[in-house]
Image (cartoon, rainbow, N blue to C red):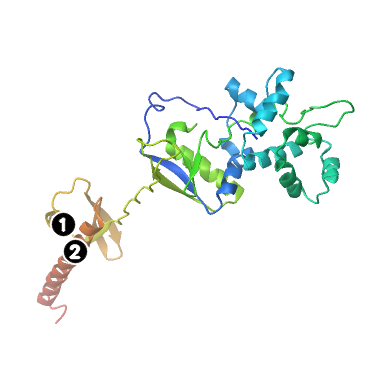
Amino acid sequence: MKFIDILREEEEEGVGSARAKYDVAIQSDDVDNVIKALSNIKNYGVYAQSLRDPKAIERVFGPRNPNQRYGAAEKEWNTISPIRKQAKIEDVIDRNPEWENIKKELEVDSNKEAVDKLSSIKDFQELVATGIFSIKKKGKMNQIDYYYPLKTPDNIKKYGGVLEKDVHFYVKDNKVIFPFDKSPYTSKPYLQKVLNTIMDTAGIEHKLVDVERIDDTSDEEAKVVEKPKKEVVPPLSYTADTRDKAEKARTAFQKEIGEVPTAKYEIETIETPNGRKYKLVVTGISADQRAKLFTRKTSLKENFDFERYQMLRRAGIIK
């Protein structure tokens, strides 16, 4: 089935000209089913969009001139991929009122077998002769009443907004890649939400990855390099019984790793069963820097415990 382009809900100045450094890709063990899921509007949920482009409308609903419809359908059938042919047949089955009779003539037991058989017919005229695209009429040839859906408000909504291979995405290295400059959506996070919705609805195990766009090569030869995963470093905290000690710890930490522009040192007041405490939280540092501060924290804690030990001993609380 030839599906439509999705148009942007909102146009942002400069979006079309600026290329994203990384494109979104779907990684899955079953790329064929990923493509099939992308061709099914039922998987899009709230993210299905409306038709606006007259050319897109014509591709879905066929030429207005009845004399041009058969030729356009034949040309399309001879150029689309096997997966798209299957999707087309599946769609027509839902619209052809004579389907059960056609299935009996095909001598198949299930719709799946019928889809496989019909989509494998290379000669378009032979395919039309099965009656899949029309109710057979005596003396009538080349009838394709059901090849194109009727152009109704409901169908405009139904067939609007399907991502299309070689228009919105391409396949390379077992990944389905969506170049941002061809995306119908105005932001990368929004595109990721749409893709996750489609895959989850279709029940396909997958994960979204970032792939680097190499600008000096063509789309067909573009090198696919997964974006390095961002290092996730948990915050480091240090708790003291006075704000003065927490501030001294902050000074010690800053001295330990030097000036780090991304580092943040925040002191929080917390209430505990043993009274008020002051918690120093350090974020925005690397794993190596955190390891250094953890070692420094240990020495600070040891010094703190020793001071407390001395104080309690002088007070006679411990011996």
Q: For this view, does 164 lie left or right of residue 102?
A: left
Whole-percent x and y of residue 244? 14, 56
Residue that carries the numbered disc 2 in the rendered image: 297
Type of the residue with mark 2: Lys
| Foreground of the two, 119 or 244 | 119
For this rendering, which residue is in front, 305 or 259? 259
Query: Does residue 95 appear in this view?
Result: no
Furthest-top residue in this view: 65
Residue under circle 1? 253
Q: How far across and down, in percent of the image, does residue 314 sit?
A: 9, 75
Where residue 157 is drawn, which disc sits there? none
Q: Is disc 1 placed on a helix, strand or loop? A: helix
Q: CA distance from mark 1 to mark 2?
A: 8 Å
Horizontal and vertical percent position of residue 76: 65, 30
Q: SS for tag 2?
A: helix
- Farthest bottom residue in view: 319
The residue closer to the viewer here, 265 or 9, is 9
Q: Residue at x 37, y 33 (%)?
A: 19
Quadrant into which the N terminus falls: top right
Q: Residue at x 71, y 39 (%)?
A: 89
| Residue name at image x 18 percent, y 61 percent | 292
The quarter holding residue 20 reads top left
- Circles 1 and 2: CB distance less than 8 Å? yes
